[in-house]
Image (cartoon, grey):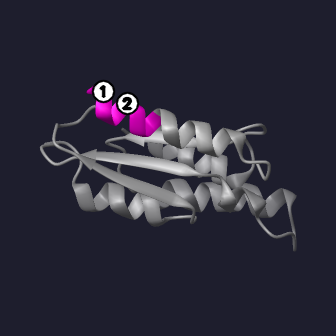
Amino acid sequence: SQGGTLATALALSGKMNGVRAVVTAGAPYVREAFDVATGLYSESNDNVENKYLQIPKLHMAGENDALVAVDSTKKLCEEGGNGKFILHEQGHLFPTRSARVKEIMDFLQLSLSDSNC
């Protein structure tokens, strides 16, 4: 859960070179993770537009997740821009039903084939 939050924040900070997309499931929004990532970005990129805010992000939440509120994952999706949100009918997990896996694969195919990445 929080690993997905930290990975998202670090990817948006630009400190994880080569990251071209982020996919999480059941990850909460934690403001402090983004404060740290913003500080890392600011230290090495004064007055430079943050191209990393354009990294495509897919965040999924389960409507039956007892650990992380759907609204928290939605907020994580909104942080940093360029996010897509999917609500699935399961709980705190990566959905493995074929329709959801196809959505994930389609997102990655589109994101990784984009010449801007």
Give the structural element (helix, strand or loop) at label 2: helix
Q: Residue at x 64, y 55 (%)?
A: 37
76 left or right, relative to 36: left
| Nearest to the observer: residue 36 or residue 109 | 109
Residue, disc 1: 98
- The prevailing secondary structure element of the residues shown in magenta is helix
Q: Is residue 102 part of the magenta span, yes or no?
A: yes
Q: State whether residue 88 is above or below residue 97.
A: below
Picture disc at residue 101: 2
Q: Residue at x 50, y 39 (%)?
A: 106
Q: Residue at x 34, y 55 (%)?
A: 73
Q: Amino acid at mark 1?
A: Ser
Q: State whether residue 37 is above or below residue 5.
A: below
Q: Residue at x 60, y 52 (%)?
A: 56
Query: Which quadrant of the view contains residue 49?
Result: bottom right
Specify the segment rendered in magenta: 94-104
Q: State whether residue 94 is above or below residue 15.
A: above
Number of numbered tags placed on the structure image: 2
Q: Amino acid at mark 2?
A: Val
Q: Is residue 23 part of the magenta span, yes or no?
A: no
Give the structural element (helix, strand or loop) at label 1: helix
68 left or right, relative to 40: left
Pinpoint residue 47: horizontal percent, then vertical percent: 87, 74
